[in-house]
Image: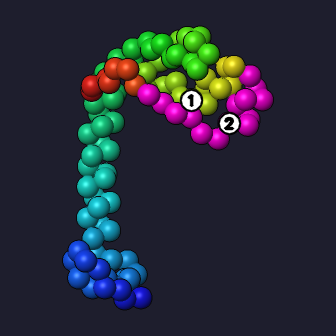
Amino acid sequence: MVSEGHIGGQFRLEENPSYIARREEMFDQLFEVQEKNKASSDNPSISILLPNGESVDGVAFETCPMDVAKGISKKLGKESVVAKVVYSNRFKF
């Protein structure tokens, strides 16, 4: 498959392109740094504000939207597909 593009010229679909190995290497390096930072930090308690105004307690980097949905009702946990997460404060490692 070949197509003309505006950026970078001609595009050719290749099987196992050479840039994939470099991207995987970069991902592994960044992931390792993130995991080390995460392991060395405390996971503070967080407050999760629900659309109805209620607040649910959780733990940063452990509590996920599915945990919250299941805590509300088992049925909601089974039927939930997506959640919108808005951070009021960002945690830094």
Q: Quadrant of residue 45?
A: top left
Residue 7, can we see it? yes
Q: Quadrant of residue 25?
A: bottom left
At 27% across and 26% down in the image, what residue appears?
93
Along the line of sight, which residue is nearer the eye, 1 or 38? 1
Q: Is 48 a magenta residue?
A: no
Residue 58, image x, y percentages: 51, 16
Residue 58, can we see it? no
At 32% across and 60% down in the image, what residue appears?
24
Q: Amino acid at mark 1?
A: Pro
Q: What numbered label is drawn on residue 80?
A: 2
Residue 79 falls left or right of residue 46: right
Along the line of sight, which residue is nearer the eye, 85 or 34? 85
Residue 12, image x, y percentages: 34, 85
Q: Is residue 71 above or below residue 1?
A: above
Q: Is 83 a magenta residue?
A: yes
Along the line of sight, which residue is nearer the eye, 45 or 37? 45
- Assign the N terminus to one quadrant of the image: bottom left
Instruction: Confirm or deny contact between disc 1 and disc 2 (CB under 8 A).
Output: yes
Q: 10 Å neighbourhood of mark 1: few (<14), some, or many (≥20)?
A: some
Q: Is residue 20 above or below residue 65?
A: below
Q: Residue furthest bottom?
A: 2
Q: Amino acid at mark 2?
A: Ser
What residue sits right under mark 1 in the picture?
65
At 23% across and 74% down in the image, what residue appears?
7
Label 1, secondary structure: give it. Answer: helix
Magenta residues, start to end: 73-86
